[in-house]
Amino acid sequence: MRQLIGALNFPGYLVPLLIAVKLLGVIVILSRVSVALSGLAYSGMLFHMLPDLIGASDFGEAVPAVAGLVVLVASFITQNAARAKPSPHSPTHAAAGAVRA
C-alpha cells in the first residue's frame, strides 16, 4: 500500500496518516459506535477512494479502487439490514419511509 500511495505522489509524512484514517474508518463502520460517525466514515471513505480512481492511469491501477468503491456502496446500501439502529441516510431506510407514507 505504501508503494501505491507513494506512486500517487503524496508527501511521505501523509502516508501513515492516510493509512490510519482509512483503517479507523473501517473500524467505525464495522463497530457502528454512532450512526452519525458511521455516516461520516462512509463519506470519508468515498472521498478518499474517488481520487484513487481518478488518478489511476490505466485499467490495472483502477481495479483496486473500483473494487473498494463497489464494496463500500454495497455496504452502505445494506447497512440497515445488519444493524439494530438504522441509518436515516441509507437508501433502504428512505425507501421504507416512502412505503409507510
Image (cartoon, rainbow, N blue to C red):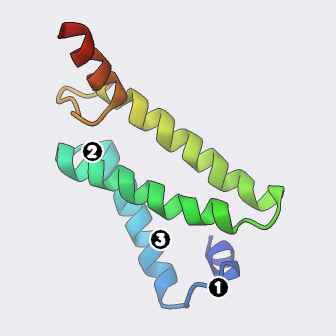
Q: Decide which of tag 3 and tag 1 comes sooner along the chain.
A: 1
Residue occupying image coordinates x 48% and y 90%: 13
Q: Quadrant of the N terminus?
A: bottom right
- The tag on residue 31 is 2
Q: Which mark is residue 40?
A: none
Q: If you read the primary sequence from the N terminus, does the residue marked by circle 1 or circle 2 appear first?
A: 1
Residue 42 point in image, percent of width and height = 37, 50
Find residue 45 and report its image quarter: bottom left
Three-letter amino acid code at the position of disc 2: Ser
Q: Nearer the viewer, residue 1 or 34?
A: 34
Identify which residue is drawn at 55% across, 90% down.
Answer: 11
Mark 2, Cα crowd under 10 Å, few <14 / some 14-19 / many 20+, is few
Outermost residue toward the top? 100
* Mark 3 vs mark 1: in front: 1
Indicate the position of residue 67 as horizontal and vertical percent values: 64, 45
Element class at badge 2: helix
- Return the residue at label 1: 9
Say if residue 33 shows up in the picture. no
- In the shown orientation, is residue 40 left or right of residue 10? left
Q: Position of residue 60 (x, y in %)?
A: 81, 57
Q: Nearer the viewer, mark 1 or mark 2?
A: 1
Q: Which residue is under mark 3?
A: 19
Tell me the amino acid under the disc marked 1: Asn
The kind of secondary structure element at disc 3 is helix
At label 1, counting other C-alpha atoms closer than 10 Å, the crowd grade (few under 14, some 14-19, many 20 or more) is few
Question: Which residue shows up at 25% across the image and 28% down it?
Answer: 83
- Dot 2 or dot 3: first in sequence order is 3
Type of amino acid under label 3? Ile
- The residues tagged by marks 2 and 3 sit, at their Cα atoms, a distance apart of 18 Å
Mark 3 neighbour class, 10 Å CA radius: few under 14, some 14 to 19, many 20 or more:
some
